[in-house]
Image (spheres, rainbow, N blue to C red):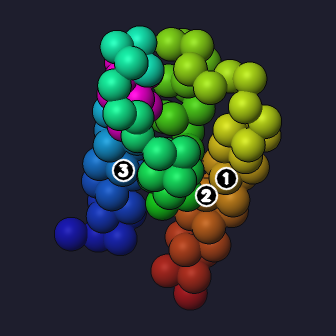
Amino acid sequence: MSLNTAIIIYLIIINAAAVILTCADKYKAAKGRYRISEDCLLTAAFLGGALAEYITMLVIRHKTKHKKFMIGLPAMILLHIAVIILVLYISKL
């Protein structure tokens, strides 16, 4: 398996997990149940799920008034893009 393929598979898995966590938190909030912590959501985003989590939050209108998510997630997306470019550049050396 190439590095590019491994990166794509990882990003698909972590983004799917971020979407599931975000939707589960929204569902639990609506039902008044125990919530998924913001730290857990931000960790999933930091580990690579920021793009899907950000889009999901906008679509389902979840945590859109929280600056740490609406500013932090786009910042993480830019960081992820930079890391991917760096890894791909280094792998071609």
Identify the residue at horizontal 69%, vertical 59% (top origin). 79
Q: Would you place residue 86 above or below residue 12 in this image?
A: below
Q: Amino acid at mark 1?
A: Met
Counting from the top left corner in percent of width and height, residue 2 is at 29, 70
Horizontal side of 38 relative to 34 (left or right) equals right
Identify the residue at horizontal 59%, vertical 32% (top origin). 54
Which residue is denoted by mark 1 in the rendering? Answer: 76
Q: Amino acid at mark 3?
A: Ile
1 vs 2, front mark: 1
Q: Determine the secondary structure under disc 2.
A: helix
For the residues bearing labels 1 and 2, Cβ distance under 8 angstroms: yes
Which residue is denoted by mark 2 in the rendering? Answer: 80
Q: Amino acid at mark 2?
A: His
Q: Main secondary structure of the magenta part?
A: helix
Q: Between residues 89 and 70, which one lies in front from this camera angle?
A: 70
Counting from the top left corner in percent of width and height, residue 48 is at 49, 54
Asked whether 32 falls inside the magenta stretch, the response is: no
Range drawn in magenta: 21-28
Q: Is residue 48 visible?
A: no
Horizontal side of 47 relative to 81 (left or right) equals left
